[in-house]
Image: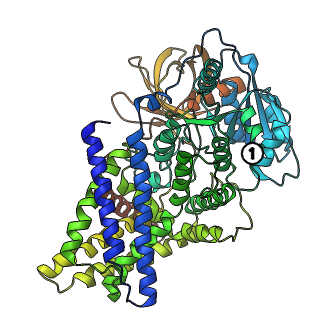
């Protein structure tokens, strides 16, 4: 970080601290009605904690060094060093066999200099015969169990009794590993082993390496807002930025899958914890507290599915929220003397994150109270407020944007906070005071939206209508200085109105017409035409059930409905497929869409590997900063009205035909 940038960061911190001191000392309406005072104190507390989480991110970014950043670069294997054995665990509860097949198949393709030292085990607490048969089909181990009362942790702890490699990797059933996973994770351990041998007094043993949570389908924000080409996945900000920063300070958080562990470290802390529903978060923290380092890498080494139905997403985040609160209570993060300072800061920041949704509701309510009911929860002169608040606010938000990389800007983060706020603040509050949920289930990633999901729109709709009415009623009849003095209230109302508008669109959803995700995979091959001639082709994208291609041989063509045989060369292996043309564009060089027919199992395994071995490059890794929230709102209005118009036209045609 340059000296100039560091100075801007420090100035933003100083100005925001001055503002907070002024807020606490001079703006609280101490003589107001009791309920008004309570809300005023909640508001100022929310501002303090919001700024605190911002300070933590900024300070971590400021103390970041080039050496720390280099620590997350994948090292090379140490020449002459013996390679450790590795156990790979594919953990399943009740997932479908077709989904498990993709993950198990990918695990068999994982590269390692000595494959004899890699053992793959399917860990099934359902003890299902069909899963055992699938394991036999792929020649991997099967570890089943019955009557598991300790969820995922119990399943893993049971499996570890039968495994003894010094390293082990965890994959959820839907998290498909890339072939490079071990090549890009084991070297961190071999380097650490060498460092420990050379200087044991100044080297921390490495407990685990966390690779990013990556997803090959668009999440609910990307898909429902028609933004799958505009913004990165909502979880990328943490996995590929914040957790990498944590890891550069040797305190990365474990996020549940696609991580590689030192077996001795897990044994030392008593295996996977069973008294929380977020065993991943708690295990990672326990390893750090026990003196083990943890790293998070920047580039994905696996990819899975994320739910896009409102109910599924909210249930998933509710489980995470309650679990982190449980784990923080179990770990006593505020008073435990064994927690190192930096580790404590990261854990507290994780805890405060789940309170951000309650804070967001307070921020939405504050201007509404004043605009609609003249309830003043901030006792301040307009000009003094502008002088003390505005410089620090805008500079701090500039710094946060700079400190948050290009994955996601703060405005998009506010939309996501607003979406979760009505449904997460109460579970967090209840869990904090010790009222636990009675039952949790694994999130169904394949769930589809139905009419009941539309009921989730109610809190957003109520807040949206109140905010719209407040904007109009608050500014109606005002002129000149009156509008200027009320501009801060109007500013916040408009910001919340935009965020709530996005939430309405998210819940309204978008039709899902594709049965499987497409991946941008470019490979060459040959097609046998109906006349027996061969023609060269080049794929444009692939999916589970088919692919699209163009001919690179002049004059070659196929008709819709024709069947064909093709051969691809994937990693020097001939992959034979059969298919049928179902779509053809009318271009000079048409793009053909085909579905697969009657593949042999060996070819299908290679085809799955071609599809899933690598990130889905059709989805962005960064947010397009040229597209503003207003652009996205306008785009959603236009696209949704077009969809509505097409539906009405089809309805009219149907009525005309029946008439």
Q: What residue did someone put label 1 on?
A: 272
Residue 439: x, y in percent?
74, 64
Q: Classify residue 528 as left or right of residue 34.
A: right
Residue 533: x, y in percent?
51, 14
Q: Classify residue 249 as left or right of residue 402.
A: right
**Residue 649's image quarter?**
bottom left
Task: Give me the residue at 45% from left, 89% from top.
Answer: 34
Task: Give me the residue at 16% from left, 76% from top.
Answer: 484
Relative depth, front residue between 155 and 549: 155
In what quadrant of the picture does the N terminus appear? Answer: top left
Q: Classify residue 626 as left or right of residue 230.
A: left
Residue 417: x, y in percent?
46, 61
Relative depth, front residue between 628 and 320: 320
Residue 650: x, y in percent?
43, 63
Residue 628 in view, yes or no: no
Q: Of helix, strand and loop, which one carries label 1? A: loop
**Residue 461's image quarter?**
bottom left
Task: Give me the residue at 42% from left, 62% from top.
Answer: 50
Relative depth, front residue between 293 and 224: 293
Task: Give me the residue at 33% from left, 86% from top.
Answer: 372
Judged from this view, the residue extending furthest toward the right is: 146
Above or below for 287 versus 113: below
Q: Classify residue 595 as left or right of residue 501.
A: right
């Amino acid at each position: 970080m340059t000296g100039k940038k560091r100075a801007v960061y420090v100035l933003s911190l100083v100005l925001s601290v001055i503002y907070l001191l002024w807020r606490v000392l001079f703006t609280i309406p101490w003589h107001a009605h009791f309920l008004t005072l309570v809300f005023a104190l909640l508001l100022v507390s929310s501002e303090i904690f919001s700024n605190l989480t911002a300070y933590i991110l900024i300070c971590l970014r400021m103390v970041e060094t080039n050496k720390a950043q280099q620590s997350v670069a994948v090292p090379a294997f140490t020449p002459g060093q013996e390679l450790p054995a590795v156990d790979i665990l594919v953990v399943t509860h009740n997932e479908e066999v077709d989904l498990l097949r993709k993950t198990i198949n990918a695990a068999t393709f994982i590269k390692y200099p000595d494959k004899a030292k890699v053992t793959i085990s399917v860990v099934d607490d359902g003890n299902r015969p069909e899963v055992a048969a699938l394991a036999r089909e792929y020649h991997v181990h099967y570890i089943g169990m019955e009557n598991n009362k300790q969820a995922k942790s119990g399943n893993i702890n049971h499996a570890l009794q039968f495994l003894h490699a010094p390293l082990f990797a965890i994959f959820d059933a839907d998290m498909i590993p890339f072939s490079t996973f071990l090549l890009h994770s084991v070297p961190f351990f071999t380097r650490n082993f060498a460092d420990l041998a050379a200087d044991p007094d100044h080297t921390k043993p490495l407990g685990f390496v966390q690779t990013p949570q990556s997803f090959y389908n668009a999440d609910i924000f990307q898909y429902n807002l028609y933004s799958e080409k505009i913004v990165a996945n909502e979880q990328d900000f943490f996995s590929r930025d914040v957790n990498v920063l944590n890891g550069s300070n040797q305190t990365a958080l474990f996020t549940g899958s696609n991580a590689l562990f030192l077996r001795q470290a897990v044994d030392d802390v008593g295996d996977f914890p069973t008294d929380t529903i977020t065993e991943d978060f708690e295990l990672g923290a326990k390893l750090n507290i026990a003196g083990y380092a943890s790293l998070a890498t920047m580039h994905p080494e696996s990819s899975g599915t994320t739910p896009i139905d409102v109910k599924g997403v909210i249930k998933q985040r509710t489980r995470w929220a309650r679990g982190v609160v449980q784990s923080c209570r179990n770990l006593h993060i505020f008073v435990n003397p064994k927690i190192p300072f930096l580790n404590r800061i990261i854990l507290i920041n994780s805890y405060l994150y789940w309170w951000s949704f309650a804070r967001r509701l307070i921020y939405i309510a504050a201007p509404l109270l004043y605009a609609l009911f003249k309830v003043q929860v901030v006792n301040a002169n307009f000009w003094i407020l502008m002088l003390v608040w505005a410089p620090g606010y805008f500079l701090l938000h500039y710094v946060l944007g700079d400190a948050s990389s290009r994955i996601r800007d703060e405005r998009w983060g506010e939309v996501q906070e607003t979406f979760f706020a009505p449904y997460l603040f109460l579970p967090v509050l209840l869990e904090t005071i010790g009222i636990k949920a009675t039952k949790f289930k694994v999130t169904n990633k394949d769930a589809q939206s139905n009419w009941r999901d539309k009921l989730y729109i109610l809190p957003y709709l109520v807040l949206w209508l109140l905010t719209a009415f407040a904007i109009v009623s608050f500014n109606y009849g005002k002129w000149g200085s009156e509008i200027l003095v009320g501009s801060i209230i109007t500013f916040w109302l408009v910001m919340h109105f935009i965020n709530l508008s996005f939430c309405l669109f998210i819940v309204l959803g978008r039709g899902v017409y594709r049965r499987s995700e497409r991946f941008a995979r470019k490979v060459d091959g040959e097609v046998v035409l109906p006349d027996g001639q061969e023609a060269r082709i080049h794929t444009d994208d692939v999916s589970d059930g088919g692919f699209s291609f163009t001919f690179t041989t002049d004059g070659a063509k196929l008709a819709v409905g024709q069947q064909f045989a093709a051969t691809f060369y994937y990693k020097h292996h001939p992959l034979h497929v059969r298919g049928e043309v179902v779509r053809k564009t009318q271009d000079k060089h048409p793009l053909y869409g085909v579905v697969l027919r009657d593949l042999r199992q060996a070819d299908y395994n290679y085809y799955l590997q071609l599809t899933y071995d690598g990130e889905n490059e059709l989805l962005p890794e960064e947010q397009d900063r040229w597209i503003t929230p207003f652009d996205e709102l306008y785009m959603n209005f236009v696209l949704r009205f077009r969809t509505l118009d097409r539906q009405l036209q089809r309805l009219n045609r149907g009525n005309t035909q029946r008439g």
